[in-house]
Image: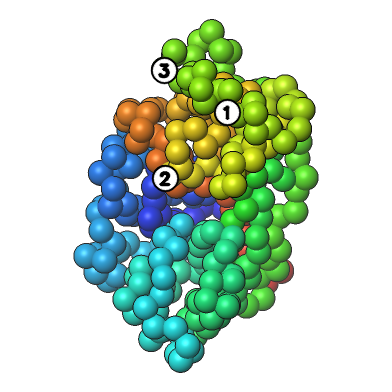
Amino acid sequence: MSFKFIDLFAGIGGIRLGFQSQGGVCVFSSEWDKYAQQTYEANFGEKPHGDITQISPASIPDHDILLGGFPCQAFSIIGKMNGFEDTRGTLFFNIVAILKEKKPKAFMLENVKQLKSHDKGKTFQIILKALEELGYKVHYKVLNALDFGVPQKRERTFIVGFLDHDIPFEFPIKKESYDLSKVLEPDELVPDNFFVSDEIRNNRQENLSRIAPYPSIWHQNISGNVSPLPYSCALRSGASHNYLLVNGYRRLTSREMLRIQGFPEDYRIVVSHTQLKKQAGNSVAVPVIKAIAESMIQAMKQKRLNVA
């Protein structure tokens, strides 16, 4: 099935990779961060348009599926439950405005797990109501990247909608194995500046909660306790350099972070490690997106066959 999609809040293209794998063609992308634009252009051959708030919905090409990992910003008006009107002043409003103008057959949105509970659930109810008011049948679920074959505990809320309410869509359910050793570089190939000081290393050892498996990624929580895990806790764009340590003594490299997010080996790195760390932390786990894309396209194909 050939289909067209747009890639909003595109980051470095993780969502795009998932839907391209199912035969999709991207006809428009938007991302305001200049360094993410550089990475995106290096890998997809096109520079995304800038700030979505400055782009008229009518100017966006027609498409079948709208995609967006929209930022989790606080909603400016909460409580009145006016659906579309309550989203004004937020970036989610731009998604709603595009859906209203272009009426694509489907959409997929991604956000943090906590979106469902933000402001005692009011924010999420406003989001659902706004989408339903536009005529979409909406599905949502929290999925964990660990279940899709990547060594990262990354739980995210996914929202999928279809104009055709009879599309037989269900979110993918997987329990694929993961292997941390396959994403890690040999220590001898890692630059010296990725290895932490003796002081940090000793501190991690002193606060270790249990015997560490090998290999493992050590995660220090806000209280100082260190958990050695056979997978990574969620990559975070703004986290300390020492938030996650491989075997307690070195930081993750740029390539390792991309692997933990499920990016292919030929994905090009053209920015500094500092920028790539931010980009990987803001990105999505590509195998999760691939699985959702496959479920969406199969459901749409099935409906077409049923109608025929």
Amino acid type, mark 2:
Gly
Pinpoint residue 266: horizontal percent, then vertical percent: 47, 25
- Residue shown at 45%/33% (left/top)? 241
Of the residues under marks 1 and 2, which one precedes in the sequence?
Answer: 1
Q: Nearer the viewer, residue 58 or 92?
A: 92
* Residue 30 location, quadrant: bottom left
Of the residues under marks 1 and 3, which one precedes in the sequence?
Answer: 3
Which residue lies under the disc numbered 3? Answer: 193
Pinpoint residue 235: horizontal percent, then vertical percent: 52, 41
Mark 1 vs 3: CB contact within 8 A:
no
Q: Nearer the viewer, residue 11 or 242?
A: 242
- Residue shown at 44%/63% (left/top)? 72
Placement of 27 over or under 303, stated as above or below: above
Amino acid type, mark 1:
Asn
Mark 1 vs 2: CB contact within 8 A:
no
Please say whether residue 260 is visible from this viewpoint.
Answer: yes
- Which element carries disc 3, helix, strand or loop? helix
Which residue lies under the disc numbered 1? Answer: 203
- Residue shown at 41%/60% (left/top)? 71
Mark nearest the camera among 1 and 2 is 1
Of the residues under marks 3 and 2, which one precedes in the sequence?
Answer: 3
Horizontal side of 202 relative to 54 (left or right) equals right
Category of crowding for the residue at label 2, using alpha-carbon neighbours closer than 10 angstroms: few (below 14), some (14–19), many (at least 20): few
Question: How far is mark 1 from mark 3, CA to CA?
Answer: 18 Å
Which residue lies under the disc numbered 2? Answer: 238
- Which element carries disc 1, helix, strand or loop? helix
Category of crowding for the residue at label 1, using alpha-carbon neighbours closer than 10 angstroms: few (below 14), some (14–19), many (at least 20): some
Question: How far is mark 1 from mark 2, CA to CA?
Answer: 22 Å
Please say whether residue 59 is visible from this viewpoint.
Answer: no
The number of numbered badges drawn on the structure is 3
Amino acid type, mark 3:
Asn
